[in-house]
Image: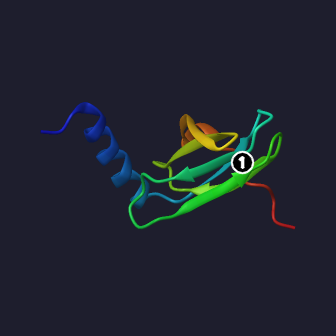
Amino acid sequence: MLNNQQITDASTTTQSLSSDPIYCKYLNPTNHIQITRISNIPNWYFERVVFPQQQLAFTAPPGARLEVHTSELASSILSDRIPCIRLQVDKPPKI
């Protein structure tokens, strides 16, 4: 039996596969190194290290969720899950 979260995840994934990618930006506002990853899109891989105060620009399917893991000494804590649609910005002009 599916719960509401699984139903939402399934519909979001279907939407994300049929739409054009969106341009997103994320800023690490902490004083710690963060690992960002998108893992809710099947057959798609995204993982990056983001240093303190560094900005990360990337494209992603509209249904993607950015997981933010913050490093604390020898461990990593899942700090947040952010829908990429909330990180969407206008694409910069091509030079």
Q: Quadrant of residue 82?
A: top right
Side (left or right) of 91 relative to 6: right
Q: What residue appears at the point 46 percent right and 54 percent down from the top-left corner? A: 39
Name the residue furthest right.
95
Residue 84 in view in this figure: no
**Closer to the camera in the image, 12 or 19:** 12
**Residue at left 55%, top 45%?**
66
Left or right: residue 38 versus residue 74 is: left
Residue placed at 64% from the left, 49% from the top? Answer: 35
Asked if residue 30 is positioned above or below residue 40 in the image, the reply reads above
User: Which quarter of the image is occupied by the C terminus?
Assistant: bottom right
Return the x and y of residue 37 as percentages of the image width and height: 56, 52
Q: Give the side of residue 42 with respect to residue 94, left or right.
A: left
Q: Nearer the viewer, residue 83 or 90?
A: 83
Three-letter amino acid code of the residue under disc 1: Asp
Residue 26 location in percent, x, y? 70, 43
Taking the image as drawn, is residue 45 in sight? yes
Mark 1, residue position: 90
Numbered disc total? 1
Say which quarter of the image contains residue 75.
top right
The image shows residue 30, relative to residue 60, as above or below, that is: above
Please tell me which residue is depicted at 34% across the width and 43% down the height of the picture.
9
Looking at the rendered structure, the secondary structure element under dot 1 is: loop
Q: Position of residue 50 (x, y in %)?
A: 74, 49
- Quadrant in which the N terminus appears: top left
Task: Please tell me which residue lies in front, 71 or 13.
Answer: 71
State how the image is colored.
rainbow
* Dot 1 alpha-carbon crowd within 10 angstroms: few under 14, some 14 to 19, many 20 or more: few
Q: Which one is nearer the viewer's eye here, 3 or 8?
A: 3
Could you say which quadrant of the image residue 79 lies in?
Answer: top right
